[in-house]
Amino acid sequence: MAVQINPSILSADFARLAEEAEAVRGADWLHVDVMDNHFVPNLTLGVPIVESLSKATSTPLDCHLMIEDPDRWAPQYVEAGAGSVTFHAEAAAAPVRLAREIRAKGARASMALKPATPIEPYEDLLPELDMLLIMTVEPGFGGQAFLDIMLPKIRRTRELISKHGLELWLQVDGGVAESTIERCAEAGADVFVAGSAVYGKDDPAAAVQALRAKAEDVTASAAWACAH
Ligand SMILES: O=C(CO)[C@H](O)[C@H](O)COP(=O)(O)O
């Protein structure tokens, strides 16, 4: 699977979201962080803004729901135009039913794990998903330091994906930058969310390309990618 770079609009200027989407032309997806100040201690945006943004950009939206009760809300993000919707394993009451509903409505279904949540209890659910997101910071804020201790979980997840022969994308989010992306790629990630490492730069589009080049260098020779 080709490397994908998804800039996180959490680090963008919320008053100029359409222009900020344009500033990362060439990115694979725009990562939209939805926070409700309950599941995480921060508040960002909701369905109406996702609906407007989906009409304002041709880059598909990868919505990461850091909210309680995703079983109720996630389908509304598909209707608002999201191409991929990620709910948290810790918040979903019925993750299989929810993943099937997201897919049935026409979006990619994805599940996220906070740093302290292991992958192993979810092995049997993986065929129900199009992507698995491993948080490499505690969710809630951009600009945090990458948690190296998540690398073994990324490796174990990649092994499970290979073991079951799945076409599942493996996304990492939090502290992904030029200094950390190679370690994530080597461990088995193929979809990379980056907020401050893209929007914190003078040329966000160039930052996307620099991240892509680093990850592609690794995946060209990584054992997991060659075996895939
Ligand atoms: O989900 C998130 C925070 O919960 C953000 O997507 C993530 O933190 C991106 O920001 P940065 O790349 O600056 O760490």
Image (cartoon, rainbow, N blue to C red):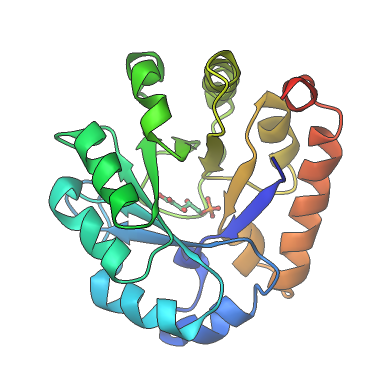
| Residue visible at 41% across and 20% down in the picture | 119
| Residue visible at 61% across and 81% down in the picture | 22
Q: Position of residue 186 (x, y in %)?
A: 73, 28
> 58 and 179: which one is in front?
58
**In the image: residue 205, left or right of residue 161:** right
Q: Is residue 47 above or below residue 189?
A: below
> 227 and 33: which one is in front?
227
Q: Position of residue 180 (x, y in %)?
A: 69, 39
Q: Which quadrant holds residue 166? A: top right
Q: In this view, does 73 lie above or below 150?
A: below
Q: Can residue 187 be seen?
A: yes
Q: Position of residue 66 (x, y in %)?
A: 29, 50
Q: Position of residue 113 (x, y in %)?
A: 37, 32
- Extreme-front residue of the structure: 104
> 145 and 210: which one is in front?
210
| Residue visible at 70% across and 69% down in the picture | 26
Q: Can residue 91 be seen?
A: no
| Residue visible at 17% across and 34% down in the picture | 94
**In the image: residue 219, left or right of residue 52:** right
**In the image: residue 182, left or right of residue 160:** right
Q: Is residue 154 above or below residue 198?
A: above
Looking at the rendered image, the quarter that the N terminus falls into is top right
Q: Which quadrant holds residue 199? A: bottom right
Q: In this view, does 146 lie above or below 4?
A: above
